[in-house]
Image (tube, grey):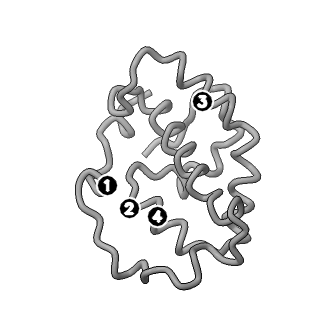
Amino acid sequence: MKTTLPPPFRALEPWVADWSIPHEAGRFNKRVATPARELDRFVAAVFPQIEAIVDFLNRIPTADPDALDAPERRLFDLALMCMEASIPGDLGWDGNDIEDAWPAERLTFLAPSLFAEPANRHKDD
């Protein structure tokens, strides 16, 4: 998989391979499996660009993430992961999930929260 992002966001490239995740189940599992300190590092790297990312994506004439070109789709998924990874820090949790939450391994994700990786993440740029 190519991991390129649109040119204005190439500085975020090191985060794409591990953090640009195209479905809710994957983002949830990444968040609860990642130590809070690492979540904070990721959020600190991406969040300062989140407004620019949203502005960039809002200029694309589609509301369908599956219609985005590959670099834009990876950027969209990276922004979603940033928003979800910021939850523990924003809510002042000590860890990556609520202490007495239902065990993550007992959750079952169904469509559309879990699906194969979208084809538009793999198109040639």
* Residue type, numbered disc 1: Ser
Q: Marks 3/1: CA distance?
A: 22 Å
Q: Which of pointers 2 and 1 lies earlier in the amino acid sequence?
A: 2
Q: Which sits earlier in the primary sequence, circle 4 or circle 1? A: 4
Q: Which residue is mark 4?
A: 28
Q: Amino acid at mark 3?
A: Val
- CB under 8 Å between callouts 2 and 1? yes
Residue 25 tag number: 2
Mark 2 vs 3, N-terminal side: 2
Crowding near the residue tagged with mark 1, few <14, some 14–19, many ≥20 C-alpha atoms within 10 Å: few
Q: Position of residue 109 (x, y in %)?
A: 29, 65
Residues at marks 4 and 1, CA–CA distance in whole angstroms: 10 Å
- Does the CB distance between marks 4 and 2 fall below 8 Å? yes
Whether label 2 touches label 3, CB < 8 Å: no
| Dots 4, 1 in contact, CB < 8 A | no
Q: Which mark is residue 113?
A: 1
- Amino acid type indicated by mark 2: Ala
Could you give the CA–CA distance between mark 4 and mark 2, rounded to whole angstroms?
A: 5 Å
- Mark 4 belongs to which amino acid? Phe
**Residue pictured at 57% horizontal, 76% vertical:** 98
- For label 4, count other residues whose C-alpha is less than 10 Å away and answer few (under 14), some (14-19) or many (20+): some
Residue that carries the numbered disc 3 in the rendered image:
54
Identify the element where label 1 is drawn: loop
How far is the residue under mark 2 from the one under mark 3?
A: 22 Å
